[in-house]
Image (tube, rainbow, N blue to C red):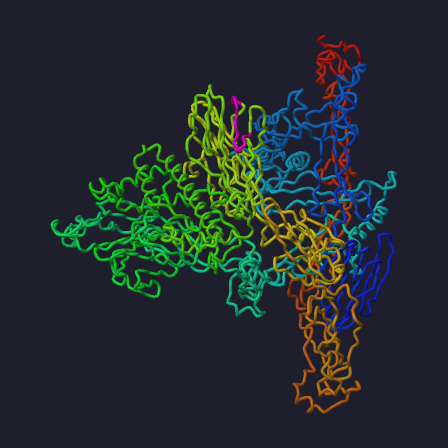
Amino acid sequence: MVVAIPYGSRQIRLMLKGPDHLYLETKTLQGVKSENSLSSTGSFLVENSSISFQKLPDKEILRIPGPLTADFTIKIRYAGAADSSVQFIFYQPIVHRWRETDFFPCSASCGGGYQLTSAECFDLRSSRVVADQYCHYYPENIKPKPKLQECNLDPCPASDGYKQIMPYDLYHPLPRWESTPWTACSSSCGGGIQSRSVSCVEEDMQGHISPVEEWKCMYTPKMPVVQPCNIFDCPKWLAQEWSPCTVTCGQGLRYRVVLCIDHRGMHTGGCTPKTKPHIKEECIVPTPCYKPKEKLPVEAKLPWYKQAQELEEGAMVSEEPSFIPEAWSTCSVTCGVGSQVRLVKCQVLLSFSQSVADLPIDECEGPKPVSQRACYSGPCNGEATEYTPEESELLYGSLQEFDELYDWEYEGFTECSESCGGGVQEAVVTCLNKQTRETVDETLCVTSRRPPQLLKACSLDPCPPRWEIGKWSTCSLTCGVGLQTRDVFCSHLLSRETNETIVLADELCYTPKPSLVQACNRFDCPPSWYPTEWQECSQTCGSGVQKRDMLCKQHLVDGSLLELPETFCSTPRPVTQQVCKNEDCPSEWLLSDWTQCSVSCGEGTQSRNAICRKMLKTGHFVINSSLCPPLPFSSLTRPCALDTCTRHNRPVHKQSPHIMAIKKVYIQTRKQKKLHFVVGGYAYLLPKTSVNLRCPTRRFRKSMITWEKDDKRLISSAHITITPYGLIKINRLKPSDTGTYTCTAGPVQEHFVIKLIGSNKIIARQPASIREEETMRKPSLNEALRTEEKHVNRILFNGSKAEKRGHLVDPSRWYDYIVSRLIQYRGWPGENLASWEAQESTERNASSEEDQSREYSLPFTMITEQKRLDDIISNLSQQPEELKDVYTEQLVVQLAQEVFKSHLEHQESVIRASRKGLDTTSMEHPVHRHVSGFTSSLRTSSAEAFLPTSVDPVNGLRRPHRKPAILRKISAAQQLSASEVVTHLGQTVVLASGTLSVLLHCEAVGNPKPTISWAKNGEEVEYNERMLLQPDDSLQILEPVEADVGFYACNASNALGSDSVSIAVTLAGKPLIKASRATVINTESPAVTVDIGSTVKTIQRVNVTISCQVAGVPEAEVTWFKNKVKLSFAHHLHDGLLLIPNVSLSDQGLYSCKAANLRGEVTESSQLLVLEPPRPLPYLKDLTAVLSSAGTSAHSVLTSSSGTNMTISPGSSALIGCAVDGHPTPNITWLYSGKPLSLQHRLLAAGRILQILNVSDAPDGEFSCLAQNEAGLLTQKASLAIQEYQWSADKLMACSASCGHKGVQLPQLMCLLDGAEVNISYCKEKPKPALQPIACNRRDCPSRWMVTSWSPCTRSCGGGIQIRRVTCQRLTVKGNSVPMSNEACAQVSKRPVDTQNCNRQPCVEWVASSWGQCNGPCIGPRLAVQHRQVFCQTKDGISVSSDQCSSLPRPLSTQNCWTDLCGVHWRVSLWTVCTATCGNYGFQSRRVDCVHIRTNKPVMEHHCSWRPRPANWQRCNITPCENVECRDTTRYCEKVKQLKLCQLTQFKSRCCGTCGKA
């Protein structure tokens, strides 16, 4: 057994199982040879190649990582009779590769030429070019196609006209058409067609011809590719005259010659045999014969018979299948004895198409003509030698002996290509010395005699069942513990030829079934949000909400879920509230309160109104009386009874009871523990506030007072306490406490309405009363007012009497609207809505009196008179539709100013009283006595103001420090005269042509006193003789001009803060827009408000408001655009505010505000950029790409917020990925132990991957990646734990013997990491420990049978016997063998046999027949071949297969022999006269015959085929003819003619046609 492994091979692994041994032979590229016996286990170097060799008791393993630096040959030294098996695998390099050459020299030095590349086969080992067939050996080696490029395109120098005109002619011929030979004609006669391919080729300086584009040859017509052929008539039979009769008397025979004559009158083949006339017939000579008459006609003798036979010798195709031999090839040698071959076809003439068709050989009957024969090419010493018969016998006898000494024979078969399911074996053909039966070099055998390839089927049994395994699926999870599955089934291959496979039951596959499932992605998931189930909807119908909780959890690798604080989840928290998908609510009647009794005494009636309302699932209401069932009249009217009327003539002794009600509206703005109220008003309060409500009476006992809520009697409870002093206490308000509370004292009643303020500043409604949420959700005020007007007309006014009195019976709905607008008003001094929202969103444990952390300039409770709200409502109801929106805004602003001013006045009076030592609780102040809630708020505010304080220089009072607040006044600009305008802030001043002065007032309060400054369009005003700052801080503009148009801002500031209000000064014309050029970056606030023109950068889920303050006369209409596309009305609010709620990435863009009126338009834009803080990603694509390029040896880990750990061996490389995302893309900074990196590293993938080149540089510490952008920063961490891989030899292998004296145990080598076994490849860099074998099982063996080898067989064939000796022995611990009795072994096992049959195959021998006649093909002078049959038979004469005699020397079946028939040679005649005297078409012929040497008579030509046949035609007189038509051979002839170059010889011949016309 020999395994040859070539130079450069890699990953060699060879394992020998059995008693034999391996040894190495090497041969370097320089030819140096060496050997290695491989006698012991170890690692060593052979020819600079590292080799690992293991020598085990039952096998030997050889590993070479490579690449090899020499040719290795691994051989086996046999050591025993038992068979050994070898398994090996290695990767063989491709030694020869194609290499593209450089471009060949250009075809022209100037004026434009071409150059090509080629490809050459290159030997990588010897670095030299070799023959192309070496590269064709590798199928993957594809020869590169030649490349073509133009070159030397610069024009030629003008001084050399030849090169410029004909760049081809001076360097190489022009491209030309070249054709392949015509194909065979489709018909041999009678007319057919033939074709050829025509291509454009170019010849280079070296004479190489290559194809080029066809356009280069278009200067001459393209040659035809199809032409007619064989248009002549088909051959016909022509019979000659009969010969004379062969006898002179009686009956004889006569002959004639019948020829097949073609259209030229020449004898040829191709005539139909069936129509051939006969060539002999009987003839009778009338002369009587005197001899006995012959019974049969006498056969003719020469010359007639011979002539007729020879003419028929050439085989012709007929309609019957027949063998048609082609011409013999030339002799295989130029001197001496060689061989000739020819092709013999089985053909038939198709009569319908007169064409010849090829048939399989077995379709032709009769003997097949020989296809090979010997030939003699004369003596090899160059001298003509005549041999005598004796010399010829001596010469050709030795040739015959040499020829017959070596021959091809089959020498068994190769191994089967498959072990089961059907394979093939190929017969091995070798060249043998027939005498010695030894294999010799193949060149000694005649190649033409090599037998054909012989294949036979083998291993036809079906393959045993085996497991078919599919690919693993993708992992089910990206982290935690996912699963991968694959298909595994038991299959059975029946036949490889048909590839037929059947699926079997699993139990039919005997090997263990491979696993179907495996774990994957086994690492902790990053913390993420896990939602709970949605709760039930807050309402069963209509518009409701449902909520859920969001928990931050981490999915661990053990499958558990770890709940973490919310800060661990870095991704945005998902929504926890959504709108329910409810159905519409059923319609219902809503009733108003009962009116007062229609009489003041006695019996009267009360009435109330009703509306039918239906709540839709969208939250809106539909009011339609037809939707509800009709109400009975009694439900809308009821009787009432008062005191009996007194007669006028009787004096009144007793006055009726009286309730001292206070008609005020209270609005709570701050959290407080408890508030005190008196009946008669409205209170809009915050939830969880405790309320004390008093009902002060005169002329009525307080213990008799009764309380009702929404017409239902109130009963004291833990939540609502009713005291005997006319007081109720409500503990911590909740939504169910809203409603109308009625205090009844005998015949009189007073009401107090409590409503809650929601978190969104919308008045919360009581569940049973009329809800007006749809009013607050309307997009415009006009629609809301129209709705309100309908309800006022239908419900709120109680008939004509009420109208006459001018009282609103139930103004609750109007109050809700006005209060909501007041709460949403943004113009409070130093205050905005954000502070309210911030305060409401925080639960406080302490009361508002205890919260002194900051100073508020707003009262804790705003108070106004009911009458003031009634006046506003009456005013609004009388306004035209188009002005209601404007008037509402103005009236609300005025109301806010009044409330705030009243609050300041009361606060200062309380402070003055407290400074004088007065007790505010004992003051007889009507307002504060009855409105104790407001008193408590003042008391709290004043307490806050005590520290720090300042002294008022006028009154000597210490006033509280306060931020500046500018007073807004809604009054219109005052036109004092035709030329002077005076106005307050918040207005628009329109300049007229006669305006001489504009005075802008700015009033501000604050402590310390604010400093006033003015700015125009964001820039500080420069004061001059026209722009004056008055002593009261007003700004006066004298003789205003167009340049003074703009927005003027009054800025009030002190140490505590600032306030600013704008006023517009404009002309009657094109509108103005207040713009800013600031850049606002928001990363925390939930809401952002900016002026148009600003650039806004904000995080997601923020409400962004863009203000577009517009001034202009006529009034301008505002239109909003996003990225130049108009926004719908639903996107923006009134007053030029655009609200972009819950901003996301899709909201990014350019927002434009266009203000337009009749005089023109103006546009300002703001850019909105949405920021996304850095957030972690579950994977990093770049890390996968880097790993694939770095190979599997690189360790990788992703950072996480909690820190990721990875164990790694020292000295290795590690990749740490920082998988983060954000907008804009975060900048990444890497830290080690909190400090910048100082160890060796590389940054990959734009810094997102950190490669640690040697982890031993970082023994302890944590790697951090800091991702930061404008929206925030994120820190991810990872730690590397370094642990050593080490060899362990603690475990022992199984003992090599169970008894005796040779048993040993070898330690089992394992690779450990932290005590756990890992793949052995991790320890390959570590030196292996020395392994010492340990003796084991050293004890006496039990008795067992011992046998000797079998003796030789008594007979070589026909059946013999073999014997051996069988004894019972016992092997001792010392290695001695002790004979035992047979009974001792018989108890253990059965006695082996000692006799067996052998060589049972029959005795066979080769038997040869006698030699045949010496009439085979001629192979030399008087030399032919004779044959005999050789077959295999038994001694009994029975023929058997030749395979059974394959081990015996086979006798010869052919030999050379001498015959006079082969004494022939070629005879030639003289040449005929040439057919032309000049030109290219002259030829001449001569006759060539094969004639016998002795008789000099012609014989069949195949007898002379062993010598080359002399030529029978040749070209002649190839000289140019004069005065013949010529043609151009270059495409530049017109240029030659124009330049008058035809006189030059070289041009005259190339341009013969064109120059001839000149």
- Number of numbered discs overlaid on the protein picture: 0
Q: Looking at the image, is 559 positioned above or below residue 801? A: below
The boundaries of the magenta stretch are: 1029-1042
Judge by depth and name the residue closer to the eye, 945 or 46.
945
> Residue at the location (81% across, 59% down)?
49
Asked if residue 922 lies left or right of residue 1440, the reply is left
Residue 548, placed above or below residue 339? below
Which quarter of the image is occupied by the N terminus? bottom right
- Quarter-of-image position of residue 345: top right
Of 1132 and 1552, nearer the camera is 1132
Question: Residue 1357 in the image: x percent, y percent?
Answer: 70, 72
| Residue 174 to residue 352: above or below | above
Outermost top residue: 1558
**Dividing the image into 4 quarters, which one contains the C terminus?**
top right
Residue 1525, magenta (yes or no)? no
Q: Nearer the viewer, residue 139 or 1003?
A: 1003
Tell which of 11 and 605 is nearer to you: 605
Relative image position of residue 822 (x, y in whole percent): 40, 44
Q: Is residue 696 above or below residue 1470?
A: below
Any part of residue 1523 in sight: yes
Residue 1038 among those drawn in magenta: yes
**Residue 282 seen from this side:** no
Residue 1076, image x and y in percent? Answer: 55, 34
Q: Which x, y percent locates residue 1358?
A: 68, 73
Q: 313 left or right of 1097?
A: right
Is 1132 placed left or right of 316 in the picture?
Answer: left
